[in-house]
Image (cartoon, rainbow, N blue to C red):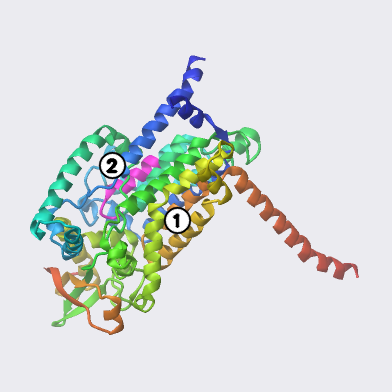
């Protein structure tokens, strides 16, 4: 058992998927902190009442406490460092050190006022910690450019880094699905949960009473969401089985024939686009979708990128062709 | 050399620790909902009623009060055991940011509350902010941001009474600047039952009541 675990955690692959995840999470960090600054919310929600904030903030963040508490100078310093580390993550500079700085500064900010946040804060802090654990700037990074002279590097990283991202995504879905114990999520309550959730003023983007006229659609969406979340561990199972097609077995053959990742991504992306369109739950969908990139192997992403590049080149060639003819005639 | 030989084992152990910590913390728990006052909310009571009916159909013999009391005792005991199991991992959750609180929309709030703000000037109350209103939009840039939505959602629950008072004081400070001719401020929530699709189609009105009403004076004279 232990030997198999050591083997599993020693397997290597190209770091492209994990590097894209890094860049997307860096962008999510910038966007998350950026909207708070842009709306002028920093002095209101992240600064203590003593200096103009709306409530008394505790000392939940060791970093802010170390800097003297949630006073403007300390909080703005943490924000500045968080933004800088976000940029560094996007361009891939500083490796794990940058990820650690981003992780700790974001953790400090998100802990300042627990009333003004949600699960998306945890989703982001978990993502940043995964970037601390894995070598996130091995490729598609400024680090790679400095080290090898190229933006891309084929130097491998542990496969476990990408698998941990997928594992975290599955944990989020499965855990939230298992906690949806309300009758409204089940056939007992007529799969009416989403209809009623979308009537709550706190989360709806705008008045959603029109959903009463397309109520059956909301029932389908409720059932789909609930089942999608509860069955999400199948994603990890299918990825594991597909990674070893030679070992045989009926279930393995099934998952080798049907790429479960495709329906998973179609439903998952659809669900998050729906959330984004109908609700205001902050950067939740953006951060969640960033995790999706890890579902795909680096060679699959490289292949799609190559085909896209060829398609663009063909398009450019075709659009140039008539112009060339006109000139030469 | 020795380090290189042992590293795959150390790495496997560290990754196993991480996966175990994440899995244990993600196991469903009633964390954050263990207040008797929160259990009295009509939304929560409605859920208990629904499940009590189902359990009765499956042969449960106790009455409604015993059913809720049993759930409370189970939740308390379960939380206690969970707390002990997670205790060794707490520093990892706290300092690495690996907490796993995925209690997202576990149940629709059938009796939500809509924040409303009024100012009193020239002898009448004027409605200046209502959640999701397109006309009463004072401070909407701030209060409609997802981070403040999260806060105002919480403050309609009784366990946040102290912070709600601080929030109202902050609104009072803003109002005294933005409405120099007003003499009073009123912050309150309209708690109502969300209408069923049939009720919406029949154009039936929202049925609710005002809660957490705070009336505060706006000091004079002001700039």
Q: Which of marks 2 and 1 is nearer the N terminus?
A: 2
Q: A3 above or below A171?
A: above
**Which of the pair B194/B210 is nearer the observer?**
B194
Disc 2: CA contacts within 10 A as few (<14), some (14-19) or many (>=20): many
Q: In which quarter of the image is the C terminus of chain A?
A: bottom right
Q: Is residue A284 visible?
A: no
- Picture quarter with the N terminus of chain A: top left
Relative side of B213 to A208, left or right: left
The residue singled out by tag 2 in the image is A61
Dominant SS type (magenta): helix
Q: Mark 1 points at which residue?
A: A286
* Of the two numbered discs 2 and 1 in the rendering, the one whose residue sits closer to the viewer: 1
Magenta range: A102-117
SS label for mark 2: loop
Task: Identify the residue shown where x is 35% and y is 35%.
Answer: B20
Q: Of residues A134 and B119, which is closer to you in this image?
A: A134
In the rendered image, the vertical position of residue A205 relative to residue A311, given as above or below: below
Instruction: Find residue A28 and report its horizontal and vertical position in percent.
Output: 45, 52
| Residue B61 percent coordinates (x, y) | 11, 56
Q: Mark 1 lies on which chain?
A: A
Question: Where is residue A197 drawn, in percent x and y?
Answer: 31, 66
């Amino acid at each position: 058992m232990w030997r198999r675990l050591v083997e599993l955690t020693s397997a290597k692959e190209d770091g492209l998927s994990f590097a894209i995840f890094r860049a997307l999470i860096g962008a999510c960090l910038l966007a998350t902190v950026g909207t708070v600054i842009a709306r002028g919310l920093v002095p209101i929600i992240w600064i203590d009442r003593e200096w103009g904030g709306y409530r008394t903030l505790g000392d939940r963040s060791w970093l802010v406490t170390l800097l003297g508490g949630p006073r403007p100078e300390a909080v703005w310093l943490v924000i500045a460092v968080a933004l800088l580390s976000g940029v560094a993550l996007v361009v891939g500079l500083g490796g794990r050190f940058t990820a650690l700085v981003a992780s700790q500064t974001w953790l400090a900010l998100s802990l300042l006022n627990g009333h003004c946040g949600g699960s998306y804060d945890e989703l982001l802090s978990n993502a940043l910690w995964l970037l601390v654990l894995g070598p996130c700037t091995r490729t598609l990074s400024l680090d790679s450019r400095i080290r090898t002279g190229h933006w891309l590097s084929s130097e491998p990283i542990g496969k476990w880094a990408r698998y941990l991202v997928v594992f975290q995504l599955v944990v989020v879905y499965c855990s939230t699905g298992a906690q949806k114990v309300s009758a409204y999520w089940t056939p007992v309550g007529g799969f009416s949960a989403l209809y009623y959730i979308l009537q709550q003023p706190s989360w709806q983007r705008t008045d959603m009473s029109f959903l009463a006229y397309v109520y059956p659609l909301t029932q389908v969406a409720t059932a789909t969401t609930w089942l999608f979340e509860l069955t999400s561990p199948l994603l990890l199972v299918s990825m594991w089985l597909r990674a070893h097609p030679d070992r045989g077995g009926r279930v393995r053959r099934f998952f080798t024939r049907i790429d479960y990742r495709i329906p998973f991504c179609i439903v998952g992306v659809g669900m998050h686009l729906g959330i984004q369109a109908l609700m205001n739950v902050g950067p939740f969908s953006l951060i969640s979708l960033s995790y999706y990139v890890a579902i795909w192997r680096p060679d699959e992403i490289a292949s799609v990128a190559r085909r896209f590049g060829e398609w663009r080149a063909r398009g450019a060639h075709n659009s140039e062709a008539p112009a060339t003819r006109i000139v030469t005639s | 050399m020795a380090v290189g030989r042992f590293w795959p084992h150390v790495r496997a152990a560290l990754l196993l620790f991480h996966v175990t910590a994440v899995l244990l913390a993600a196991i469903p728990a009633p964390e954050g909902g263990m207040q008797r006052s929160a259990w009295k909310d009509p939304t929560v009571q409605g859920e208990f009623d629904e499940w009590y009916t189902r359990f009765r159909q499956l042969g449960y013999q106790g009455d409604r009060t015993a059913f809720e009391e049993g759930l409370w005792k189970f939740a308390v005991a379960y939380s206690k055991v969970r707390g002990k199991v997670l205790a060794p991992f707490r520093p990892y959750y706290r300092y690495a940011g690996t907490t796993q609180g995925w209690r997202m929309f576990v149940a629709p709030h059938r009796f939500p509350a809509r924040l409303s703000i009024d100012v009193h000037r020239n002898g009448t109350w004027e409605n200046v902010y209502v959640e999701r209103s397109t006309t009463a939009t004072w401070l909407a840039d701030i209060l409609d941001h997802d981070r403040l939505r999260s806060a105002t959602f919480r403050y309609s629950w009784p366990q946040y009474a102290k912070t709600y008072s601080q929030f109202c004081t902050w609104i009072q400070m803003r109002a005294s600047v933005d409405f120099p001719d007003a003499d009073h401020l009123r912050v309150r929530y309209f708690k109502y039952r969300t209408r069923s699709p049939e009720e919406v189609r029949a154009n039936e009105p929202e049925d609710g009541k005002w809660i957490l009403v705070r009336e505060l004076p706006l000091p004079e004279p002001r700039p």
